[in-house]
Image: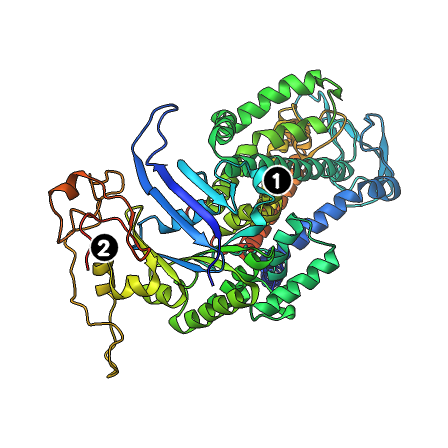
Amino acid sequence: MTSSKNGPWRTAGRQLIRNRPAMISAAAFLIILLACLAAPLYAHHVAHVDPLASNIAGTTVVDGRTTDLLQQSTDGLGLGVTPLGPTWDPGHYLLGADNQGRDIAARLLYGGRNSLYIGLASAFVCCLLAAVLGIVAGYFGGWIDAVLARLFDVIWAFPVYLLAICLSVVLVTGGLHIGPLHLNAGSLLLPILIIAVIYVPYVARPLRGQVMALRERDFIQASIGSGAADWRIMRREVLPNVLPTLIVFLPMMTALNMLTESALSFLSVGVQSPDASWGTIINDGLGLLYTRPVVTVAPGLLIALTAIALNVLGDGVRDALDPNARLRGGA
Amino acid sequence: MTGDVLLKATDVVKNFPVRSGAAGRRGPVVHAVDGVSLEVRRGETLGVVGESGCGKSTLGRCLVRLGEVTSGRIEFEGQDITRLSRRRLRPVRPGLQMVFQDPYTSLNPRRTVGEIVAEPLLVHRRGTRAEIRGTVADILDRVGLTAEQADRYPHEFSGGMRQRVGIARSLALKPRLIVADEPVSALDVSIQAQVLNLFADLQEQLGLTYLFVAHDLGVVRRVSNRIAVMYLGRVVELGPADRVYSTPAHPYTQALLSAVPRIDDGTPAQTPARERIMLSGDVPNPIDLPSGCTFHPRCPFARDNCRTERPPLSVDATGRQVACHYPLG
């Protein structure tokens, strides 16, 4: 059946489009996303570099002169090397090189691909798991709810980063092998799964509460009275009512998960070298903080910009879908 | 116009645990429905009245098997449905539908009216998508809505129209019995009349049987052939509507009727003017029911044995049932 022009989704859509900060944030996020997706294009056709291979002896052209990517340090004892700084020339190491002679700009785009991929994918996996568990727990109640609620408590009892680091140290170094499921140590699926699982209670708990309240509404009783099976009621009566909450969570969880990913990668238990993520690039830049701060600052700014954009967008989505929702407490 | 027994309830009890204590521990319970026996005959409207909290809505829900009964027996069309599982109930459900009190919570806000009315048909696989669409249009037409309104959402409708949607949903499976749980009490008085007329028309056209739960005595009188008066989870009086209204036999019924405001419009009163009977005290706690007749603490005519012996629901010569040791009249 065609939906009416006053349907709840369309009303929300119209309200979201009128929300200027949310729309600007959506545009900013989209630009970052598209730029990162275009990373190979930039690396191969503009910068002509390989973002993953180290290029210690490499040279590039700055102001018409051939220059070493890694230059002998001139200060102090003259030991070690300092990588090339920003040239502001897109064709020749726009933001300079890191201490392995790799193009920072290209690595930022490739790193962004990983960061955003992990953030988005783990947000989807997290919301999916949370939706299933939260709806089942809230709908059935009783011992099923008791078991699931305790499971959430157990996960939630660990400090998020500590749990993530523990899981990552074990899994990212050894890989995951459960029955037919084999994930190699370097696989990006590992951080995705780890981050998704640790945030499941964050999403599942409010959902569970919402479903418990819905369970008492008469339209659920009416559905039971018509003879519908539980799974049908959960899918057709409960899910459409919690979908707005899930959709509100999605951008916020993407931002949160991306931050977690960056933190894990920074601690070298997330994305593994030579692959990049914004977190690993910050780590790369740590030793160059005084000489080449751009290596640290650029990915940091991108992380902050993306996280802020996603949060403002998430607020806008929430305002549009459910003006009464209070997901963040206070306010 | 009344025929064979469609629904028969025998000693139906429904208790709610006050607080779910540790597993296996038996805590205090609310006696919501405390041994109700009644019959609903094909083609009639049985009104169930009582104060709020007397268990009339709970009884209604038990009778359509929304929620388990604690004990007792429910038969629908001769079949014992008391302990049927959800799966075994499925073929029974179409005959036995419910209209809910609050049209604001009984319709899923995220689904269109067409989807809401079509849902029971989809659950029971009554035809193809196109056929169901046609059926939905017919039903909407029957309750006074148009087929075009099928694509609208509940929030676009007024309370009265929402209740029409709720009625349409209950009609979808061509039920024999509809349990209407205070179907008009959430509506404006002007709308109430329209919805009550709709109920009457549908009964005439489709040969429906109603169990009509309400607290509004005027509403119940208008729609019911027979009336059951409930107090604290028990039926205290059950009989033909006219007789219960004109000559109440139970002191509680008398007090309840005397509380109905009367409009003095100059016409001769159809029923003799009643003395206003003020009941003293509050309704006792349904967790800790009084001994004997549960009405005795408030009954102006209570005697010693009322405090100790529970009066059975006994039938008098005219077929009226009263649960009182000393019925009036």
Query: Circles 2 and 1: CB distance less than 8 Å?
Result: no
Identify the residue at image location x=20%, y=59%. Answer: B255
Q: Where residue B238 sits: x, y (%)?
A: 32, 54
Residue type pointed to by label 2: His
Indicate left or right for B41 with B264 as reference: right
Q: Which mark is residue A8?
A: none
Q: Which residue is mark 1?
A: A231
Nearest to the observer: residue A155 or residue A109: A155
- Answer few, some or many: residues within 10 Å of disc 1's Cα (few below 14, many 20 plus, some between 14 and 19): few
Q: Where residue A60 sits: x, y (%)?
A: 85, 36
Q: Nearer the viewer, mark 2 or mark 1?
A: 2
Q: Where residue B146 sits: x, y (%)?
A: 62, 71
Nearest to the observer: residue B91 or residue A30: B91
Residue type pointed to by label 1: Trp
Q: Which residue is mark 2?
A: B250
**SS of the residue under disc 1:** helix
Identify the residue at image location x=62%, y=60%. Answer: A13
Q: CA distance from mark 2 to mark 1?
A: 48 Å
Give the total of numbered labels. Answer: 2
Nearest to the observer: residue B191 or residue B245: B245
